[in-house]
Image (cartoon, grey):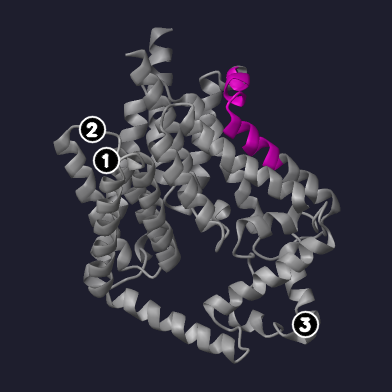
Amino acid sequence: MQTNNTRREWFIRFALVFFCAGFWRGELMFISFPLLTVAWFMDGGIYRLRQVARIPLTQAILLLCALLLLGLLWSEWPQDGRMKWVKYFSLLVFIPFCALINKERLPWALGGLIVSYLCVLAVGVYQWLTIDAQGIPLLGMSYLSFSAMLGIGAIVTSGIACMNPPVRLQRLFVIATLVLLFIQFHQNGRIFLLVTLISILLIAFLRYQIEMRKFLTILVSVLIVAVVFAYSSPVFQARLIQIKSDIELLQQGNYSSSLGYRLAMWDVGLHGIAERPLSGFGTGVPEKYFEKTITTYKDGLYKDLPEFQETAHYHNDWIEIGMHIGVPGMLVLGFLLWSWYQAFHRNNLNLLGSGLISFIFLSGLTDTFIIFSRTPILLLIITAIAINWYKREQQS
């Protein structure tokens, strides 16, 4: 009996570590997620589901997934296209992962996350320095995913630095933040870079809002660092030139650009939500709606956009979910963000929570961040580890 318990415990720890290491590759998710679920069942997770369901974040995830399933009732079948909406259900991974972590398993999950993050970072930096790659081609990670990963890392390190750790440790986290920002400045993801800087400044403001002189010092320092990093980055300067080019195309009525495409998607999306505000068009239909509508909407102003870029989503979390399941879906998305922040707030991690949730919210204004590659899973892992870390500190 003792031997079986020991084997089960080692299997659970392996599942946690493997999940933290495997979620970076989409193919490995098909192994790591079922493995994590099996470990959860072996640990009696189904009997403790009520305990995990008390967490507001869990409730929000379950409610969002339930609404999306309900939206299939008025959807169109058969569904084709890229079916990006299925990625919403990857949020459910929070339930078994959070439930499996306890005081003894926490170091394994934390260690797995840190080691895997550093390995992915090392591969990304190596490919950037050797072949001037954007993103991490070796891992199938786009420049946007890599930039988001760097931004999240910078927010976490800056958040910890503002929590009054020992001076040497604080300096280490500040240096880590600067290194991550420097690398991020050399990636094409300009929106994630801007959102990262805003989130870091928000953390600093919340920490030093009473001591405004310190905050202003940090603000000036961040601006100076941003200018220096921008000046040293050919990629950043090239993106500035592209922004000017996008604006010029817009002035000519040409929406075949990164900026123009987003504006067109938002325009059509808001028009669609206004048509069916209560129900949306059904889960999985918004992609088809865009391609059908642009042929006649505003006299076909956007009809050539599918040739510029394949339609996949609406580049906005709120519009995307609103097109699927209407205003109720948008309200649930708001509840999701609120409950996500509460997960940090209830565990006395306000600074870190404010930084990460502002990153999610602001990123979701220009992209479908909630279903964006592996990034939401990284954030859920960080959330679960942070919650259990605080609980362990309270118990010790």
What secondary structure characterizes most of the magenta part? helix
Distance (Cα) linking label 2 and label 1: 7 Å
**Which residue is tagged 2?**
165
Q: Residue 270 vs residue 384: left or right?
A: right
Q: Residue 171 vs residue 46: left or right?
A: left
Pointer 1 local density, CA inside 10 Å: few below 14, some 14–19, many at least 20: many
Q: Which residues are magenta?
A: 48-65
Q: Residue 278 in the image: state x and y as whole percent.
A: 83, 51
**Which residue is tagged 3?**
298
Pointer 2 local density, CA inside 10 Å: few below 14, some 14–19, many at least 20: few
Q: Are marks 2 and 1 in contact (CB under 8 Å)?
A: yes
Q: Residue 110 in the image: state x and y as whole percent.
A: 34, 34
260 shown above or below 381: below
Q: Nearer the viewer, residue 370 or 16?
A: 370
Q: Residue 131 in the image: state x and y as whole percent.
A: 26, 73
Label 1's element? helix
Distance (Cα) linking label 2 and label 3: 57 Å
Residue at figure coordinates x 55%, y 64% from the top left:
366
**Which residue is tagged 1?**
161
Which quadrant does the N terminus fall into? top left
Residue at figure coordinates x 72%, y 48% from the top left:
329
User: Where, by quadrant of the figure, is residue 266 drawn?
Assistant: bottom right
